[in-house]
Image (tube, helix red, strand yellow):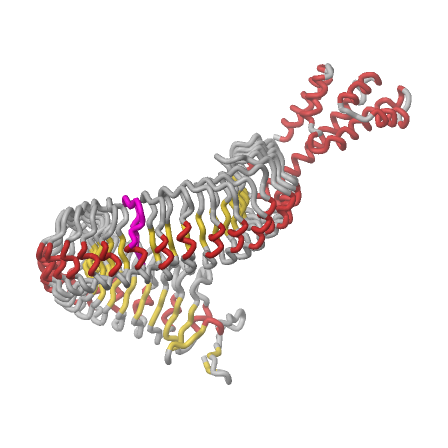
Amino acid sequence: MELDNCGRYQLKSTNTENPLNLQSYLFSQGTKVCLGLKELSLTKVPEEVFDLENISFLLLSNNNITDIPDNVSQLEILEGLNLSCNGLKTINRLVYHLPKLQLLDVSNNELEAISSEICGLVMLSQLFANGNRLSSVPSTLGHIKDLTVLGLNENRLKNLPNSLGSLSKLKILGLERNEFEFLNPEICRIEGLQRLGLSGNHMTNLPHEIQNLTRLEQLLLDDNEFEFIPVQLFWIEELRELAMSGNRLSAVQSEIGNLKKLKILGLNNNLLKDLPAELCLLKELEILGLENNHLQHIPENIAELFQLKELYIGSNNISEIPEGLSWCSNLEVLSLFGNSLTGVPIEFGNLKKLHTLVFSDNKLEELPKAISVLENLNILALDGNRMSAVPTEFGHLSKLRHLSLRKNQFEKFPLSVCKVSTLEIFDVAHNSFADIPPEIAELHSLTVLNLSCNHVGNFPPELCALVHLKSLDMSGNMLEELPEEVSLLTSLTNLDLSENKFFEFPKSVCAIPNLVKLRFDQSSGSQVPSLPDEMEFSSVFELIVSNNTLRTLPNTISGMRNLVSLVADHNEINSLPETVCEIRKLHVLHLNDNKLTSLPENFDQLINLTDLRLHNNPLKTPPIDVCVSGVPQPIGRFIRRALEREELLLNMMFERMKCDLNKNELRYLMKKFHFPEEKMMEFEQIHPGKENLPERIYSAMLFWKEFKGEEATAEELLRILHIVGHDELAQSLRLMKIYAQRLRF
C-alpha cells in the first residue's frame, strides 16, 4: 500500500483475477491506517483485505461473516479487530496469535466458547465478548496481564476462573445479564478495578472481600435479588455510582451516609417504605432514582442535597411535597408521576434550573401558579390529573417545548397555552372540549399536535396556519368534513382521522403535499362506502382505511406512486381493480375480513409485495391456501391458469348448448340475460333459419360473456339455466364442470 499524489492510500492486490477496490473504505486515524467494512452484508472477509500492508485496524462489524480464514495471520501489525454482530460460532485460532493485537471485539455472535489459546494475545488490552452463548471462559484469560477492559455481558456465565484475579491492570469488568448467583472472591483482588457491572443476574449478596476494591467508582447491581444493600459497600469510599434498581430492598441502612463521593444512586423498583435521614448527607449526589417503591414521604431535609440535578420519585404513595425540595436549586429534572399530589409548595418556583417536570397521574385540580414561573421549563407532563383550566400566567413559560395535558377534565380548550409560542409538541387528547380557538394559529412552532378523543366537530382553518406541523391526530372526534385549506399543511407527514363522523372520505386530504401516513379507521366512527378518484393525487406512503364499508378501490389508485402499505381490513370489498397491480412499490397489503372471491389477473406484477393478508375472504380464484404464502408470483400464475380454464370451460359449455336449445328457448334465455331487443333481432338476421340456430346460440353466448365481463362465469350460467327451467341442461353442464375440475387436480 502506497500514497498516491493526492495523499490517499492506494491498494496493491495480488489477486489479479478479481481485484477488489477497497479505496473508499480506507481511512487514517492519526498515524494508523484503518479499513472500515461494517454493514456491507459480507458473508466472508474479502481476500483482498489480507493483501494490505500496514493496516492497524480492521472493522468488520454488522455483517454476516461466519468464519475467519487462515490468512488472517498475514495481518501481523493489526492492533484492532472488530468482528461484532456477525454469525461467528468459533474464532479461528490464528486470531489468538496476532502479535500486536490490542483490541478484539467479538460481541453479538454465536460463540459458545473462547479457546485457551487466547493467552497468545500478549498485548491485548481490551476484549469484548458481550452477547454470545458463553457458559465459561478459559483460565488462561488471566494470563493477559495488560488487559484493562473485559466485556462478558449477556452470556450464560455462572462462575469465573480464579485466575482472573491476577488481572492487576483491569479497570472495567462487565458481567451483566448472565447467570451468576455469587461473585468469585478472587475478582476482589483486582484492586485497580473502577467499574464492575453485575446487573441482571441472580445475586443476593456480595463477598466480604468486595471492600478491597478501594478504587471502585461504579457498581451496577440492578435487577438482581438483593434484599438489603451489602454492608461491605459502605466502606468503598471512592464509589461514585451505585445502581440497585429492580431488587427486593425494603430499607436503606443509615450507613449509606458513608458514601460521601456518591453522585448517582439508583433504587427504583424496590420495596422501600421510607428513607433514612443519612441519605441527605450525600452532598455530592446529582442523580437519585426512587421510582416505583412504597414511599409515603420525601425527607424534609432533602434540601441538603444541594448538588442534586435529577430526582425520580414517581409511582409511590406521596401526597405532599416538602418545602425543602424547593431549595434544591440545582434540580433540572423532577419526576413525580403516579403519586397522590394535589399541589406544590409556594416556594416551588425557586427551582429556576428545572427543565423537565413530570407531574402525570396525580390529583391536581388546577395548575399551581408556582409552575408558571419556572422560566427554563422545556418539558411539562401533566396528563392524568383533574385539571379543567390553565391560568393566564402559563404564557410566561417562554422556553416550553413539550406539554402534555391528556386525560384531564378540560371542557374548554386551554386558551392560555396558545401564548406559549415556543411549544413544539402539544398533547391534549382524552378531554371533552368541542371547539378549537382561532388563537391556536399562534403556536407557530408546533410540530406534533394530538387532539384525539375530544368532541371537536369543526376543523378550524386557523389550524392550517401551522406550517411546521408534522403530526396531527384528530381521531375520536365529531368531524364531518375538512376545509380545503388543509393543503397548506406542507410539513404534515402523519394524519389520523379515525373514529369521526365523516359522511364521505374527505377529498381535501389528497391535496396535502407531503403526507406520508394517513389513518382513516372507522371501527366506532361513521363508515364511508368509497374512496374518491382524487386518491391518485395523494403522496401517501401508508394508507389505513380499515373498518369502513368499501366495496372496491378506485381505479385511480394506481396513481399513488409512493404507496408502500395499504391496510383495508374489515370492509365489504368484493373485487379489486386491475390497476392495483400497477402500484409497484407496494410492500404491505392487508385485506382481511372482506368479500373477495378473486384477485386481479396481473397480481404477480406486485413484485415488492412481502406482507399479504387475505384471511376471512370467500376466495375462489385463487383459493386461500394458495394465498397463504403471501408470494405474488404463484398467486398470479394460478389466477391466469384459472382464467384460462374458465374460458375453456365456458366455450365447451357453449358448444354443448348449441344442440340443446330451440329458437323459442334461446329467445327466452336472451331476455333473461337482458339483451336489448335490437341485439336479439340482429342475431336472427345474421343467423336466420333452423339450420343456423346452433351458430345463433353460440354467438348469443359469446355476447353474454362479453356483456357480463367478470361476472360471466360457469357458475353464473348454471344459475340462470336453473332459474329459467332448463334443469336437464344445467345438470349436464354441471357434470361437465365437475369433470373439468377432476382433470385439473
In-image side of 550 versus 344 (left or right): right
Q: Which residues are magenta?
A: 356-369
Q: Given the current orientation, which residue lies at the most extreme bottom position?
A: 5
| Magenta-span inclusion, residue 418 | no
Q: Position of residue 643 (x, y in %)?
A: 68, 35
Q: Given the current orientation, which residue lies at the most extreme front position?
A: 392
Q: Nearer the viewer, residue 334 or 285?
A: 334
Residue at x 40%, y 48% (from the top left corner): 414
In-image side of 327 versus 44 (left or right): left
Residue 256 image-quadrant placement? bottom left
In-image side of 607 versus 310 (left or right): right
Q: Position of residue 117 (x, y in %)?
A: 26, 65
Whether residue 491 appears in this view of the structure is yes
Q: Position of residue 507 (x, y in %)?
A: 61, 45
Q: Position of residue 88 (x, y in %)?
A: 37, 58
Q: Nearer the viewer, residue 714 or 737?
A: 714
Q: Main secondary structure of the magenta part?
A: loop
| Magenta-span inclusion, residue 363 | yes
Q: Nearer the viewer, residue 614 or 189?
A: 614
